[in-house]
Image: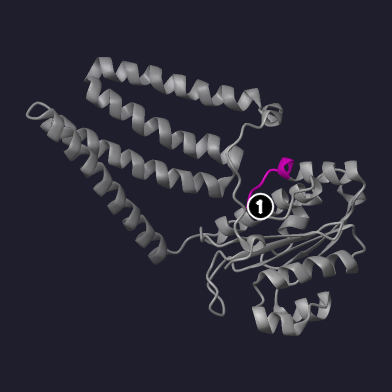
């Protein structure tokens, strides 16, 4: 049976009113303004060419430019590219849906709806598979995660409020978490430093992780992540130690891509360990790992119980 500490962190859906303060009215205004402009243009197209063409215009152009502009600005290029793919697939499916429905609607409305849904599903699946095949043949650029410094600011603020210091040991993220945290003003008062232990030798020699632990459980494992966190805490003289070890790219030594273990050695000797295993591609895996690392450190500061 899997230990609860090694299970993925499942959070229930909840309303967080504190996040309302982070809303930028300008961003939301641009989104609604963009949507209103597209709707107005769609109305003109509908009056000129009919409701079918107008509906297709509303669906297709409204999604793609938004993905290219608003998402790129707010979430970064990698996220925009990912959303653009989904928008393109969905839009092509919607065109097929509308075309089939238009042909069959007068004959049999019920059959037309079923046929249109089936067509949309089939076209979307085919487009997705073709896109995956194309990216595999042509290759795909990988991006470092483009994460707003604001997401790290809450960790720095909480560390300062509680008077704690943080030491980090990063493997698969290659120092990205430390780089993001130290971009926050005032981070030098609470971040003691970070160690990048990219391979087994540096984990053993630099951090002092027990070689038998890695031999028994594997370099990417909960016990090794736990040991790395405690060693980072000790070596860097910090109140809190954080560690991450995982496989973000190609599978290694029988361990699948996307498998990641994160650990926090708390000031009160608690140790939080989390495991994530879904593979989203190397770039997205790192983005997930960085974001979940910040969340886990923040939870430890809030007194998150071990589950």
* Residue 17 percent location from the top left of the image: 68, 28
- Magenta segment includes 158: no
Q: Camera-side residue: 11 or 291?
A: 11
Mark 1 neighbour density, 10 Å: few (under 14) some (14–19) many (20 or more) = some
What secondary structure do most residues of the magenta stretch adopt?
A: loop
Identify the element where label 1 is drawn: helix
* Residue 155 percent location from the top left of the image: 79, 46
Give above or below for 3 relative to 292. below
Which residue is labeled 1 in the image?
292
Is any part of residue 179 visible from this angle?
A: yes
Is any part of residue 196 visible from this angle?
A: no
Quarter of the picture containing the N terminus is bottom right
Give above or below for 204 relative to 33. below
* Residue 232 percent location from the top left of the image: 83, 66
The colour scheme used here is one colour
Give above or below for 237 relative to 186. below
* Residue 110 percent location from the top left of the image: 14, 31
Q: Residue at x 45, y 34 (%)?
A: 65
């Amino acid at each position: 049976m899997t230990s609860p500490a090694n299970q993925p962190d499942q959070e229930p859906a909840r309303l967080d009113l504190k996040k309302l303060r982070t809303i930028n009215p300008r961003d939301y205004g641009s989104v609604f303004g963009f949507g209103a402009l597209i709707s107005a243009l769609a109305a003109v197209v509908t009056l000129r060419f009919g409701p079918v063409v107008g509906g297709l215009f509303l669906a297709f152009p409204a999604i793609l430019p938004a993905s290219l502009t608003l998402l790129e600005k707010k979430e970064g290029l990698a996220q925009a590219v990912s959303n653009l793919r989904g928008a393109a697939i969905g839009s092509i499916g919607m065109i097929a849906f509308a075309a089939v429905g238009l042909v069959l609607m007068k004959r049999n409305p019920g059959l037309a709806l079923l046929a249109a849904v089936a067509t949309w599903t089939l076209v979307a699946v085919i487009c997705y598979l073709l896109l995956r095949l194309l990216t595999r043949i042509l290759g795909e650029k990988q991006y470092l995660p483009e994460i707003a410094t604001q997401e790290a600011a809450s960790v720095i603020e909480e560390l300062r409020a509680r008077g704690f210091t943080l030491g980090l040991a990063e493997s698969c993220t290659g120092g990205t978490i430390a780089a993001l945290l130290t971009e926050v003003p005032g981070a030098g008062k609470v971040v003691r430093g970070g160690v990048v232990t990219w391979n087994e030798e540096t984990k053993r020699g630099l951090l002092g992780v027990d070689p038998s632990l890695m031999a028994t459980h594997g370099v990417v494992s909960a016990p090794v992540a736990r040991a790395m966190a405690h060693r980072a805490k000790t070596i860097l003289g910090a109140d809190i130690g954080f560690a991450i070890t995982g496989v973000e790219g190609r599978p290694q030594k029988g361990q699948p891509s996307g498998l990641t273990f994160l650990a926090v050695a708390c000031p009160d000797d608690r140790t939080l360990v989390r495991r994530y295993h879904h593979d989203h591609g190397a770039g997205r895996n790192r983005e997930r790992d960085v974001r979940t690392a910040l969340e886990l450190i923040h939870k430890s500061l809030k007194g998150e119980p071990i589950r």
